[in-house]
Amino acid sequence: MNTRYFTLGLALAAALLAGRAHAQAAPADPAATPETKRLLSNLYKLREKGVMFGHQDDLAYGLTPEGQRWIGEPGRSDVKSVAGSYPAVFGWELGHVELDSARSLDAVPFAKIREYIKQVHAQGGVNTISWHLDNPHNGKSAWDTARTVQYILPGGPDHAKYVTYLDRLGNFLGTLKGAKGEAIPVIFRPFHEHTGSWFWWGEKNCTAAEYKQLYEFTINYLRNTKKLHNLLIGYSPSDVETPAHYLARYPGDGYVDVLGFDAYYSGDGSAYKKTMATNLPILAQVAREHRKLPALTETGFERLPTADWWTKTLLPIIADYKLSYVLVWRNGRPDHYYAPYPGQTSAADFKAFTQDKRVLLEKQVAPLKIYSKNL
Ligand code: BMA
């Protein structure tokens, strides 16, 4: 081969590869709404400014300075009470929407969840949704581990029941509308922590093929039958060992927008540090190769007994990874909470964590108008 053409060819290949690495990833849904496309593109760019902090059920309930529950007080948020701003990301749980129940499995009325999601969108924050759906095969909870997936796939005896569950989920998601009637974009994160085996969709409770088929059927049904084009889909296993393990049940780039994982701190933290040291580089690599948005989709330290956990443990671990967001779990009970309330042991350190320039709360994100302007 003529060396000149060979060199030109090499240069062209390099340019194409570089272009590919830097190209803006579009939502997996080719029919995603303009707001959904804009949100995803802005979330990519926001990573240059910092990592957004998120909290599950932040507006729905929390704990008082005495450590007792408060429920549904308009405007109240434990993160805001301690740090002076709402979180940038708000997690919501739709478990039991599939039963047509008035309240979620964590006792929040769905009518309230709808209002909170609208409020967050209007304020310029980000909503993400988890779904601990009951077992459609036997009516037990998400934590039931009986073999199930094979029965609810198309052709299975419980498929019609699962479709009813999806209809109810989709109907709720279809009511999330902004001030102009536009669908509110949300990050929907189904069948999470599937490399663990504590849910009926977990690793030991279904095959990889079954899991992928369930995931694909679900997303296709929400897109094509329920006509929802405001969903950014989050894929988040729990702990994995290798990139291959991370991707073993990945449904494919056409179904997923956000890549993450869930991991909780406990005890002396040695297991958490090991998990993070293994999983954060895997996440970074897979997200880069698949051009997806990386996030720490669930984390936290229950009851926060260590005063400096935020700045001495969490921040140094996540700081270098250009994550989109890190979300801590709910302040559900006096013995089950993951963000501090005023006076809690780690409150001052949490405030310092949120004041670090690498951490973004709603007050930094809202002025950017991520739903209407391109960053
Ligand atoms: C778990 C706990 C449960 C809750 C579930 C779904 O981690 O917080 O109490 O029902 O998440 O939100």
Image (cartoon, rainbow, N blue to C red):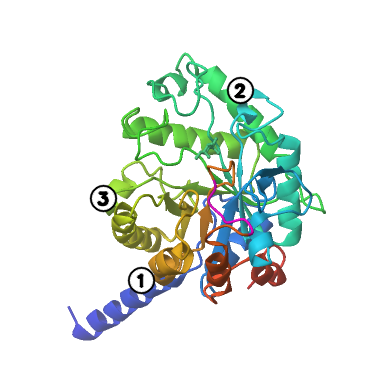
Q: Please tell me whether residue 221 is drawn above or below residue 342 in the rendered image.
A: above
Q: Name the residue under label 2.
A: 164
* Residue stretch in magenta: 337-342
**Is residue 306 visible in this depiction of the protein?**
yes
Q: Looking at the image, which residue is at 26% across and 52% down?
A: 242
113 horizontally vs 44: left or right: right
SS of the residue under disc 1: helix
Q: Are marks 3 and 1 in contact (CB under 8 Å)?
A: no
| Residue 17, numbered label | 1
Answer whether residue 155 is magenta in the image. no
Q: Which of marks 2 and 1 is in front?
A: 2
Q: Name the residue under label 3.
A: 241
Q: Observer-nearest residue: 180 or 365?
A: 365
How far across and how far down the image is residue 235, in percent?
A: 45, 47
Badge 2 amino acid: Thr
SS of the residue under disc 3: loop
Q: Looking at the image, which residue is at 59% across and 29% down?
A: 166
**Disc 3 to disc 1, C-alpha distance:** 28 Å
42 horizontally vs 141: left or right: right
